[in-house]
Image (cartoon, rainbow, N blue to C red):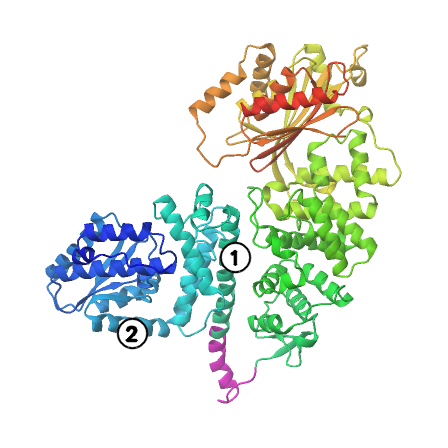
């Protein structure tokens, strides 16, 4: 489609605000232009309007209007600021200059446009730039709009000369500014609601690269950089038009509309394109700043070196061998002079492994040379290639930077074609810190710390890299991932037995953490089912380490010392079964001395008794979770409650905890026979024992006496918990945010031989467990035990229930209970 000039003859004649506003509106609403043409057209239109204002104001000689910053680059987004400098040579009267400024600034403000303005002489502009790095960066993009062209050109020449002369001093300041901003805003490549301008890899960093290039000290790798910048600007344009605001933050609620405006399939496609652009900018920034450091270091060393050599030209940079065809030179890993990438298909992996093991970056030139010349690896890979991949994955934190260098030049997807589906794939879950591909690399990094715990560290590292490889395919990613892992493992040269182990690890990488936090470990069926899935002690050992590495690489909400202790307990029980022992049943687990004391007191008093014990996990839990750090981790308190058996205990306790703003980390409920605690009674299971781990949402923990008093009232019906929670919610309404998926309640098939397992997945909220408990009581079932797990904003709870006679629920009744609980939560 041919673009049409939106300005009419009447528009061009009318330089007032109404004519400009009408032409601007037509331009922004027209479908004929978008992207760079629209930004350029908007800048031209604005130039014409400002030229009319400047001319109509009767500007004195020796004055000019200069566009700086984004406007100076001709990159006007729909809601961009107008960055303007009114430049004058100082010959005109100050009042005359001020009047000229008013005649330009006020029409801009009258239209509601954001304006960043200044009035300076060239001397003042240079002085301010020398004092303020941001001003100097804006002036590097200075562009003449109207007035004295020689004045503007003279300022541009002087500012560029100043920048180049002061580059050794200003560039380290600019780098520090970029790093501070990245620390505040995070990495654009991984944020679910990124700031397109301020986050690392965003438009600010792209502008900083232009400034480095203007210094003539170093230059950014240009391939793909212009396209990345254009893509980010296009997204920002669509965001401005969607929101009608000058915002750079791509909020979740705007992403679908922005994607539609850009003609993209969905919000995930939008984020993936943003992430890809950000990675291009980030990688270019890393390479450029490394080159700046090298040049500045060379300049500082060269005079001393010349003096030592008596004024000679100096010596060639030292080259230290690292591996066959790979050397270190000037702080980077480069190819040896004799290296022949076209004859050595293992070279990329060998160079990457050597760089990661040495903790050095791969030279951009080396990576590009290998990407252009190297031949594909044969299938299956030779043993050396597989060993070099394992060496790269086992290098720890340096693996990340080296992997990103290979990925930036397309080498990873050539080595592992299945990587393309997970590359830059967002994870719309607050628990996850990274995109899918970066999470896989992070898991390998975490796994490298655990290799001493397993007999096959190579399988652990490769499983870490592949465990989520099925994401992006339809269905359960673990099931899809098992198929892909088999293919990849065979392709890279593992034998048939190792391929089977890797497939099992990928298929069941969530098995231990989900079972430990959502199932009753005292139920023999739970332990047997895990043992059957794992199959061998060696695989169990690997799966234990993979579980920890995966959780640590996910985010802070996914792992803690108490989760580690639960998994370690499960691993111990499963290991015993795999060694030939029978799992212990729930009836074999004796109460502790404290539990006995509380149960006896509850029986004698006829009311609830409880104990609160503040905890920090670390030493004990770390010992339980083999390989743990043992560092203290604040957990909150352990709350043990004993109460004579009666209906409504679970919902009453959960409601009281919610009233006191206590978040439930985990909960267990079981009956205790009085004979088991030494009381001469024929009754069985007449005391309920509840073991909770809780933490205060904010503020200090409540006193045990207050908790007990409210619990007594809740159990006798004198405390209306639902009303109290409703009053609190009304007094402190929650802020509107993204709409959470609806709750889902299911019956776990073959979950237990002793009880029916009801699984609840819902958005975590105060009082959620209380509402679930009430719904289960309304269904007429008995809760044998409850296992509560919270991951970020998601609650995943499992309830072991029976009928009033202690029997499993028939299939149809179990489904009805699940439907009833789900209905109660949705209502």
State left or right for residue 1 relative to residue 386: left
- Asked if one can make out residue 783 in the rendered structure from this viewpoint, the answer is no
State left or right for residue 495 relative to residue 63: right
Q: Position of residue 760 (x, y in %)?
A: 63, 29
Q: Residue at x 59, y 70 (%)?
A: 367
Q: Residue at x 56, y 19 (%)?
A: 706
Q: How many marks?
A: 2
- Residue 598 in the image: above or below residue 631: above
- Residue 339 in the image: above or below residue 582: below
Crowding at dot 1, Cα within 10 Å, few <14 / some 14-19 / many 20+, comes out as many
Crowding at dot 2, Cα within 10 Å, few <14 / some 14-19 / many 20+, comes out as few
- Residue 79 in the image: above or below residue 55: above
Label 2: which secondary element: helix
Q: Position of residue 204 (x, y in %)?
A: 41, 58
Q: Position of residue 366 (x, y in %)?
A: 59, 73
Residue range (magenta): 296-316
In which quadrant of the rendered view does residue 621 lie? top right
Characterize the magenta stretch by its predominant secondary structure: helix
State left or right for residue 654 relative to residue 11: right
Q: Position of residue 104 (x, y in %)?
A: 18, 56
Q: Residue at x 77, y 67 (%)?
A: 382
Nearest the viewer among 309 and 778 is: 778
Tell whether position 305 is magenta: yes
* Tag shown at residue 276: 1
Nearest the viewer among 636 and 427 is: 427
Q: Residue at x 80, y 31 (%)?
A: 525
Asked if marks 1 and 2 touch (Cβ < 8 Å), the reply is no
Give the quarter of the figure containing the N terminus: bottom left
Nearest the viewer among 145 and 296 is: 145
Label 1: which secondary element: helix
Which residue is disc 2 drawn over? 157
* Tag shown at residue 197: none
């Amino acid at each position: 489609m041919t673009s049409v000039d939106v300005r009419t003859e009447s528009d061009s004649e009318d330089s007032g605000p109404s004519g400009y506003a009408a032409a601007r509106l037509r331009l922004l609403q027209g479908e004929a232009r978008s992207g760079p043409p629209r930004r350029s057209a908007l800048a031209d239109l604005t130039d014409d309007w400002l030229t009319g204002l400047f001319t109509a104001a009767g500007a004195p000689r020796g004055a000019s209007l200069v566009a700086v910053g984004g406007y100076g680059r001709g990159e006007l987004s729909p809601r961009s600021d107008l960055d303007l400098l009114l430049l004058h040579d100082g010959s005109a009267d100050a009042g005359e200059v001020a009047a000229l400024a008013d005649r330009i600034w006020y029409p801009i403000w009258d239209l509601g446009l954001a304006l960043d303005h200044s009035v300076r002489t060239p001397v003042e502009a240079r002085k301010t730039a020398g004092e303020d790095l941001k001003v100097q960066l804006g002036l590097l993009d200075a562009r003449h709009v109207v007035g004295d062209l020689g004045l503007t050109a003279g300022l541009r020449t002087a500012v560029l000369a100043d920048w180049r002369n002061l580059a050794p001093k200003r560039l380290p300041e600019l780098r520090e500014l970029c790093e501070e901003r990245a620390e505040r805003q995070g990495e654009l490549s991984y944020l679910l609601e990124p700031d397109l301008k301020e986050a690392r890899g965003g438009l600010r960093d792209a502008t900083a690269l232009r400034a480095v290039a203007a210094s003539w000290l170093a230059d950014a790798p240009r391939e793909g950089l212009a396209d990345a910048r254009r893509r980010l600007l296009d997204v920002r344009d669509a965001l401005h038009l969607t929101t009608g605001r000058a915002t750079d933050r791509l909020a979740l609620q705007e992403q679908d509309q922005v994607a539609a405006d850009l003609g993209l399939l969905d919000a995930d496609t939008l984020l993936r394109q943003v992430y890809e652009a950000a990675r291009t900018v980030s990688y270019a920034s890393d390479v450029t700043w490394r080159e700046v450091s090298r040049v500045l270091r060379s300049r500082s060393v060269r005079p001393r070196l010349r003096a030592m050599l008596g004024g000679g030209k100096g010596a060639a940079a030292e080259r230290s061998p690292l591996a066959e065809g790979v050397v270190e030179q000037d702080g980077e890993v480069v190819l040896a002079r004799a290296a022949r990438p076209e004859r050595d298909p293992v070279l990329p992996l060998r160079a990457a492994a050597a760089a990661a093991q040495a903790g050095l970056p791969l030279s951009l030139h080396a990576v590009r040379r290998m990407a252009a010349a190297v031949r594909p690896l044969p299938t299956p890979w030779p043993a050396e290639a597989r060993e070099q991949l394992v060496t790269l994955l086992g290098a720890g934190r340096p693996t990340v930077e080296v992997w990103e260098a290979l990925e930036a030049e397309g080498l990873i997807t050539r080595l592992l074609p299945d990587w393309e589906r997970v590359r830059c794939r967002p994870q719309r879950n607050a628990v996850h810190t990274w995109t899918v591909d970066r999470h896989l690399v992070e898991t390998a990094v975490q796994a490298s710390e655990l290799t001493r715990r397993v007999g096959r560290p190579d399988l652990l590292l490769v499983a870490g890299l592949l465990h989520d490889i099925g994401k992006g395919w339809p269905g359960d990613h673990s099931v899809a991932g098992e198929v892909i892992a088999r293919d990849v493992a065979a392709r890279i040269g593992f034998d048939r037995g190792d391929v089977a182990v890797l497939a099992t690890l990928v298929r069941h990488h969530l098995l231990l953490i989900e079972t430990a936090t959502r199932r009753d470990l005292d139920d023999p069926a739970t332990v047997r089912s895990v043992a059957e899935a794992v199959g061998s002690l060696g695989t169990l050992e690997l799966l234990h380490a993979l579980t920890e590495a995966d959780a640590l690489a996910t985010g802070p909400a996914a792992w803690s010392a108490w989760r580690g202790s639960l998994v370690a307990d499960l691993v111990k029980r499963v290991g015993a079964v795999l060694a030939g022992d029978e799992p212990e049943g729930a009836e074999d687990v004796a109460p502790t001395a404290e539990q006995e004391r509380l149960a006896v007191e509850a029986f004698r008093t006829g009311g609830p008794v409880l104990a609160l014990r503040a905890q920090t996990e670390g030493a004990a839990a770390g010992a339980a979770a083999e390989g743990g750090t043992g560092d203290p981790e604040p957990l909150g308190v352990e709350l043990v409650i004993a109460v004579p058996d009666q209906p409504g205990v679970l919902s009453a306790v959960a409601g009281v905890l919610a009233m006191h703003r206590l978040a439930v980390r985990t909960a267990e409920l079981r009956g205790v026979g009085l004979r088991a605690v030494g009381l001469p009674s024929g009754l069985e299971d007449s005391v309920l024992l509840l073991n909770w781990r809780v933490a205060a949402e904010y503020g200090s923990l409540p006193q045990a006496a207050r908790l007990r008093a409210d619990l007594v009232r809740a159990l006798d019906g004198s405390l209306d918990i639902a009303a109290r929670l409703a009053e609190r919610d009304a007094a402190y309404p929650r802020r509107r945010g993204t709409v959470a998926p609806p709750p889902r309640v299911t019956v776990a098939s073959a979950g237990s031989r002793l009880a029916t397992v009801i699984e609840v997945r819902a958005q975590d909220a105060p009082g959620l467990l209380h509402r679930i408990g009430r719904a289960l009581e309304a269904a007429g079932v008995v809760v044998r035990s409850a296992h509560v797990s919270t991951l970020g904003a998601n609650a995943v709870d499992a309830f072991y229930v029976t009928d009033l006679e202690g029997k499993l629920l028939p299939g149809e009744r179990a489904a009805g209970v699940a439907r009833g609980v789900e209905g109660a939560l949705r209502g």
